[in-house]
Image (cartoon, rainbow, N blue to C red):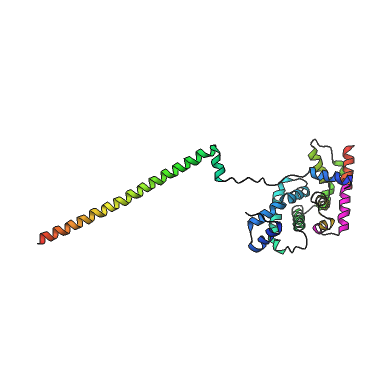
Amino acid sequence: MKQYNEHQLISRIILYDDHKAFEMLMNLHENGIKNLLLKLLNFNDSELDDLFQDTSTKIYRSIKNFKGDSKFATWVYKITYTTFLNHYKKNHRFQNLKEIHTENNVSKIEPAQDVKMDVEKMISILRPEEKVAIQLSYIQGFSHKDIAVVLNCPVGTVKSQIKRGRERIANTFKTYKT
Amino acid sequence: MKRHEVDIQELFLLAERNFEKKQVPQRNLLFRLKNKKNLIPILMGLFSFLGILQLKMRSINEMAYTNLGLFYDSYTNDVMEFFSYISMSM
């Protein structure tokens, strides 16, 4: 198939319901979406594929509603985050989201043998919105304004979430070293 | 970027995984023919195809000739009978 840019692929999906174009479009964002979902799921691989499938379906169904007010990537990550929140509410109905993410108390983290596991544990202590803000800011290179669209909150809140996340990790690191 | 920002970026980068699908390069028939290992099964396939085709053609021809022969035989018989009938009546 001919190489199309993102805008052309979106146009093809909307105009011709082109499945191949949608596949190509998702290939562009798959790595980023899956890495964000993996962090939100506290590196639990078992739910990753299902959640990614849900996200893709939602993107496909609502792509006709994409008006281009924001960047397509921003819109995609907004859907990803909303899908995660819905999935979490559905599967952990009796547990409060904030409780789950703060129950991994800082003092509970013990040095693991594998460095990657240590890193994953450190990231797991963050709240979902902090993970999204840090991931999109430092890895995807999003502006605070775009992250605010994804999280549906003011820009100031995004800044404080990044700061809080950073502090949380710094504190964990101090406890981890001692 | 400040030092602590670099640290947190490195931490998040360490947790990144590569989910990109490995693209298998599409090889054309010419490339496959250049590879001698691939040539044997291609030739074997070609010969078996031609063999089957030849058998099919032969059986079709045989069928056609047989039918034609039968038709010819029945036609000549009819003609002979007709002439014998005429000669007898005369």
Residue most extreme to the top: A113
Please provide the residue range marked out in magenta. A148-166
x then y, percent, for residue A36: 77, 50
Check if residue A163 falls in the magenta segment: yes
Location of residue A75 with respect to B34 vertically, above or below: below
The residue lying toward the viewer, choosing from A149 and B54, is B54
Residue A45 figure quarter: top right
x then y, percent, for residue A150: 80, 57
Location of residue A171 with respect to A154 vertically, above or below: above
Residue A35 horizontal side relative to residue B5, left or right: left
Residue at screen point 14% across, 57% down? B84
The residue lying toward the viewer, choosing from B39 and A72, is B39
Residue A51 in view, yes or no: no
The residue lying toward the viewer, choosing from A101 and A10, is A10
Residue B88 figure quarter: bottom left
Q: Quadrant of the C terminus of chain B?
A: bottom left
The residue lying toward the viewer, choosing from A54 and A101, is A54
Name the magenta segment's main secondary structure.
Answer: helix
Residue at screen point 71% across, 57% down? A6
Residue B66 horizontal side relative to residue A28, left or right: left
Residue A156 figure quarter: bottom right
x then y, percent, for residue A21: 65, 56
Residue A162 in view, yes or no: yes
Residue most extreme to the left: B90
Check if residue B90 falls in the magenta segment: no
x then y, percent, for residue B68: 28, 53
How many marks on residues? 0
